[in-house]
Image: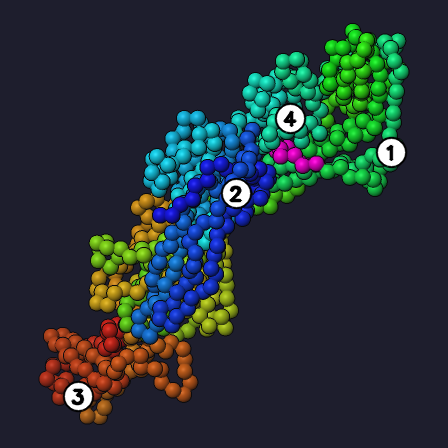
C-alpha cells in the first residue's frame, strides 16, 4: 500500500485560523466518465494518489477552545471498491465505484484535552454527541509525550518507521468513505478543547515562555491559536488590542494587564526640558475593525467595528486568532480606537537617576498633564533617565452590546439506525428473466442518509455487495385494518390511518390526473394501493382516502389486512432493485444494511422469493354462460406484466413466450384440470356428466407464464 509521511508538518491552520490547507487535502482526480454499453460503469478515479502537504510550516499551539483546520501528515492512497447491480434480460449491469482513504491530520503543537465537532468541507462530519455523519473510523492522539504510534500507521509503515508524533495532537481517520466529498480527502476543521474553560493571556505567555515569562492578572480568552518564533510573536496581535503591560525585571519578562495605580511624577522632578507633542486629527484612524472567531456561530469568522466621527479617515484593521464573544470583540474595537486617539499625544522628559527603576510598559501620572501615560522607551544617560511616554486610554475595554450574527452551517442531526424493508412486488418493466426484489430504507432520525447493502440468496452462507441504499424512503405502519375493496374504481368512502416512522417523513395529497400517472403508490402488507388524499393528523399520523386498490394485479391481497402491518411509499427515487439468481424461485432473500449508526452486525430484512415481477397477473372479467346444449362457455380477458396501462383499440402485449392457461374445475367429489391456448374454454355437457359436476362448483383460471404462473381468477357456478 502506497503511503505518505510528513515528518515536519504544519502551517498556521484552521478554518478560523488559517484556512489555507484546502489544497493540501485535494486529490488529482480524473473526472472522465467511462461508459460502455455492457456493462455500464459509474464514475471512477484515474489516479489514486494523495496530494502531499508542504514541509517546514508551523502548527499553532492551541489554548482554551478553538476551531482550527488540520493538516494531513500521513495518508494512504485511495482505496477503490467495485459493486455490480442490475443486469438481466436485455439490460446491462451497472458497475459502481466507491472510494475510501486513511490519513492522519495534525491539530495542535501542544497537548489538548479532546475534540468536539468536526467539519468536512464546511459540513458537519461529527456532531456534538460524538456521532459521525459519514462513515469513518476515528482515533484521537492528544499529544502527550508518551503517546504511542498509531496502530494503522505501524501496520502500513512498520514499527521502526512509524512516528508517534509525541507532543503533537493529531487525529487518524481510517477508511473514510469519500463519496460525500467528491472522492477526495475533504478540508477538515476541528472544535478543539485544549484547556478547560477560558484561559488568561498571562497563562498563555507563561506556557509559551517555558519559565522566561511571569504573569500577573491579565484578561482571559475563550480560545487562542498561538504561532510565531517567540512569545512576543505569539501574543503580539493581542497586545495591539488588549491592554497589556510587558516589562523586563532583569531576569524575566513580566506580563500584566494595564491597571493598578500609576507611578506619580511630581512637578519639579524633571532635570531637562519636557516636550509634549500632539499629532493632528487627520492622521488618526476614524474606524477600527477587529476580525475574530465567534463561539456562538460555530467559531466562524466575525467582525466588529468601532467608528469615530464620520469614519472617513484611515481605517485600522486587525485580525485576532482568538475566540471572543461579540460583546468582547466590540469592546476591544472601541478600546483600540480610544487608545489610538489617546496615543496621538506623546511626551519626552528627563528625570533624575532615582527614577531609573522605571521600565518600558509601566504607567505613570504626570503633574500638570491630564490622563495616564505608558513608558514606551527608557534611556539611561549621564546623570539622567530619559523617558518617552504615550498617553493611554481607559484601563479596561468595555463589554458593549453587539450581535454575533446568525450562524450558517449544517444542523447537528443524529444519523441513527437504518429502517429496512425488502419486498417481492409486481413492479418493474416485466422484461426481466430473474426475480426482482425491491429494497426501501430510511432512518427514524432526521439525520439518516445512507447505508451499504449486501445480499444473500443461500440463507446467509455467502454475501454479495449490492451498493448503497437510495434516498430515504417513507415508511410506517397501518393503525387500522383496511377492508376488502374492488380494483376498478376510486374508493371514495374507505379510509386508512397510518403512522410514519420518522419526523422528517411526510405524505401529500395528489389529484386524479397524478394518480393516473402513478403518483402515491404504496405497499400495504402484500397489496399495492394508491391514495389521492393524505390528511395530517399530527404526531406523524395521516388519514388516507380516495383509494385505488389492488394495483398491479394485487387485488388478491385486498382482504388480507391487519392493524400494524407495514406501509411504505413506493417512490422510484427511494428504491434499490436487486435481482435474485436464476433458479432461486421459492427460496429466501436476505439483505443487510450497514450504516453509520447500525453497529457491526447491521440491520437485516428477509423476503420469500415468489417471483412477483415474473408472474403474469391473473385474468379478469371471468364469466360463464350456459348454451342451449347444456355446455358452459367460460371466457376471460388476459392481462400482462408488460402492459399495465389502458390501450384503446388494441390488446395488451402478451409478455410471455406463448399464451397458455390452466383451468381447475372442482366441486363436491371431483376435480378436472384443463389447458387452453386461448382466453376461452368450453366445459361440455358430456364432461360435466363424466365429472358429476353438480352446482355449486368452482372454476379457477391461471395464466401459465414463461417463468411462473399467475394467481388464479375464481368463478363459482351456481
Q: Secondary structure at mark 3?
A: loop
Q: Secondary structure at mark 4?
A: helix
Decide: few, some or many residues near mark 1? Use Cα within 10 Å; few <14, some 14-19, many ≥20: few
319 inside magenta stretch: yes
Decide: few, some or many residues near mark 3? Use Cα within 10 Å; few <14, some 14-19, many ≥20: some
Q: Are marks 1 and 4 in contact (CB under 8 Å)?
A: no
The answer to whether residue 610 shows anywhere in this view is no
The residue at which mark 3 appears reads as 684
The answer to whether residue 603 shows anywhere in this view is yes
The residue at which mark 2 appears reads as 54
Q: Secondary structure at mark 1?
A: helix
- Distance, label 1 to label 2, CA atoms, is 46 Å
Q: Is residue 718 above or below residue 255?
A: below
- Distance, label 1 to label 4, CA atoms, is 30 Å
Along the line of sight, the residue nearer the viewer: 326 or 653: 326
* Left or right of residue 718, residue 91 in this image: right
The quarter holding residue 377 reads: top right
The residue at which mark 4 appears reads as 232
Seen from this angle, which residue lies furthest bottom? 628
Along the line of sight, the residue nearer the viewer: 331 or 287: 287
Residue shown at the point (31%, 79%) measured from the top left: 655
The residue at which mark 1 appears reads as 281
Amino acid at each position: 500500500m502506497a503511503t505518505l509521511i510528513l515528518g515536519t508538518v504544519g502551517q498556521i491552520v484552521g478554518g478560523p485560523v488559517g484556512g489555507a490547507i484546502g489544497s493540501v487535502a485535494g486529490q488529482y482526480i480524473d473526472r472522465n466518465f467511462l461508459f460502455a454499453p455492457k456493462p455500464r460503469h459509474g464514475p471512477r478515479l484515474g489516479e489514486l494518489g494523495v496530494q502531499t502537504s508542504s514541509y517546514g510550516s508551523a502548527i499553532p499551539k492551541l489554548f482554551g477552545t478553538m476551531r482550527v483546520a488540520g493538516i494531513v501528515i500521513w495518508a494512504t492512497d485511495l482505496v477503490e471498491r467495485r459493486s455490480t447491480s442490475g443486469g438481466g434480460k436485455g439490460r446491462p449491469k451497472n458497475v459502481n465505484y466507491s472510494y475510501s482513504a486513511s490519513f492522519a491530520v495534525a491539530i495542535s503543537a501542544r497537548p489538548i484535552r479532546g475534540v468536539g465537532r468536526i467539519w468536512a468541507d464546511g459540513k458537519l462530519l461529527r456532531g456534538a454527541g460524538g456521532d459521525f455523519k459519514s462513515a469513518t473510523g476515528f482515533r484521537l492522539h492528544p499529544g502527550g509525550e508518551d503517546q504511542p504510534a498509531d496502530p494503522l500507521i505501524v501496520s502500513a509503515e512498520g514499527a521502526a518507521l512509524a512516528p508517534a508524533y509525541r507532543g503533537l495532537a493529531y487525529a487518524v481517520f481510517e477508511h473514510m468513505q469519500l463519496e460525500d466529498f467528491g472522492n477526495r480527502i475533504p478540508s477538515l476543521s476541528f472544535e478543539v478543547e485544549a484547556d478547560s474553560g477560558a484561559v488568561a493571556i498571562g497563562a498563555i505567555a507563561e506556557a509559551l515562555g517555558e519559565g522566561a515569562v511571569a504573569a500577573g492578572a491579565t484578561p482571559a480568552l475563550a480560545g487562542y491559536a498561538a504561532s510565531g518564533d517567540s512569545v512576543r510573536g505569539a501574543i503580539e496581535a493581542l497586545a495591539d488590542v488588549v491592554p497589556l503591560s510587558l516589562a523586563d525585571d532583569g531576569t524575566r519578562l513580566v506580563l500584566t494587564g494595564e491597571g493598578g495605580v500609576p507611578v506619580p511624577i511630581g512637578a519639579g522632578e524633571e532635570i531637562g526640558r519636557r516636550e509634549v507633542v500632539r499629532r493632528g486629527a487627520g492622521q488618526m484612524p476614524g474606524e477600527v475593525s477587529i476580525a475574530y472567531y465567534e463561539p456562538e456561530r460555530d467559531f466562524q469568522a466575525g467582525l466588529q467595528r468601532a467608528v469615530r466621527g464620520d469614519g472617513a479617515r484611515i481605517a485600522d484593521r486587525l485580525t485576532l486568532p482568538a475566540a471572543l464573544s461579540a460583546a468582547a470583540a466590540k469592546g476591544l474595537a472601541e478600546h483600540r480606537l480610544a487608545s489610538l486617539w489617546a496615543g496621538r499625544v506623546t511626551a519626552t522628559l528627563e528625570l533624575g537617576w532615582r527614577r531609573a527603576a522605571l521600565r518600558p510598559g509601566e504607567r505613570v501620572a504626570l503633574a500638570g498633564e491630564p490622563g495616564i501615560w505608558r513608558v514606551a522607551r527608557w534611556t539611561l544617560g549621564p546623570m539622567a533617565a530619559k523617558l518617552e511616554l504615550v498617553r493611554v486610554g481607559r484601563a479596561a475595554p468595555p463589554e458593549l452590546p453587539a450581535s454575533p450574527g446568525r450562524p450558517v452551517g449544517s444542523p447537528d442531526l443524529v444519523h441513527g439506525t437504518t429502517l429496512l424493508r425488502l419486498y417481492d412486488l409486481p413492479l418493474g418493466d416485466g422484461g426481466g428473466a430473474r426475480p426482482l426484489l425491491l429494497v426501501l430504507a430510511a432512518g427514524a432520525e432526521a439525520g439518516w442518509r445512507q447505508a451499504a447493502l449486501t445480499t444473500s440468496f443461500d440463507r446467509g452462507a455467502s454475501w454479495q455487495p449490492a451498493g448503497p441504499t437510495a434516498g430515504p424512503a417513507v415508511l410506517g405502519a397501518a393503525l387500522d385494518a383496511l377492508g376488502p375493496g374492488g380494483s376498478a374504481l376510486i374508493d371514495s368512502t374507505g379510509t386508512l390511518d397510518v403512522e410514519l416512522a420518522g419526523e422528517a417523513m411526510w405524505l401529500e395529497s395528489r389529484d386524479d390526473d397524478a394518480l393516473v400517472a402513478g403518483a402515491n403508490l404504496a405497499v400495504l402488507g402484500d397489496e399495492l394501493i394508491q391514495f389521492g388524499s393524505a390528511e395530517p393528523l399530527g404526531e406523524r399520523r395521516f388519514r388516507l382516502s380516495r383509494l385505488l386498490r389492488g394495483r398491479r394485479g394485487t387485488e388478491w391481497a385486498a382482504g388480507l389486512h391487519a392493524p400494524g402491518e407495514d406501509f411504505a411509499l413506493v417512490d422510484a427515487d427511494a428504491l434499490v432493485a436487486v435481482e435474485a439468481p436464476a433458479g432461486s424461485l421459492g427460496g429466501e432473500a436476505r439483505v443487510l444494511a450497514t450504516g453509520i449508526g447500525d453497529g457491526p452486525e447491521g440491520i437485516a430484512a428477509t423476503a420469500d422469493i415468489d417471483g412477483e415481477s415474473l408472474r403474469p397477473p391473473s385474468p379478469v372479467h371471468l364469466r360463464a354462460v350456459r348454451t342451449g346444449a347444456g355446455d358452459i362457455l367460460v371466457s376471460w380477458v388476459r392481462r400482462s406484466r408488460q402492459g399495465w396501462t389502458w390501450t384503446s383499440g388494441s390488446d395488451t402485449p402478451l409478455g410471455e413466450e406463448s399464451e397458455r392457461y390452466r383451468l381447475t374445475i372442482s366441486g363436491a367429489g371431483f376435480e378436472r384440470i384443463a389447458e387452453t391456448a386461448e382466453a376461452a374454454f368450453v366445459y361440455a355437457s358430456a364432461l360435466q356428466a363424466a365429472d358429476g359436476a353438480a352446482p355449486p362448483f368452482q372454476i379457477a383460471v391461471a395464466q401459465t407464464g414463461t417463468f411462473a404462473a399467475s394467481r388464479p381468477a375464481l368463478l363459482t357456478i351456481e
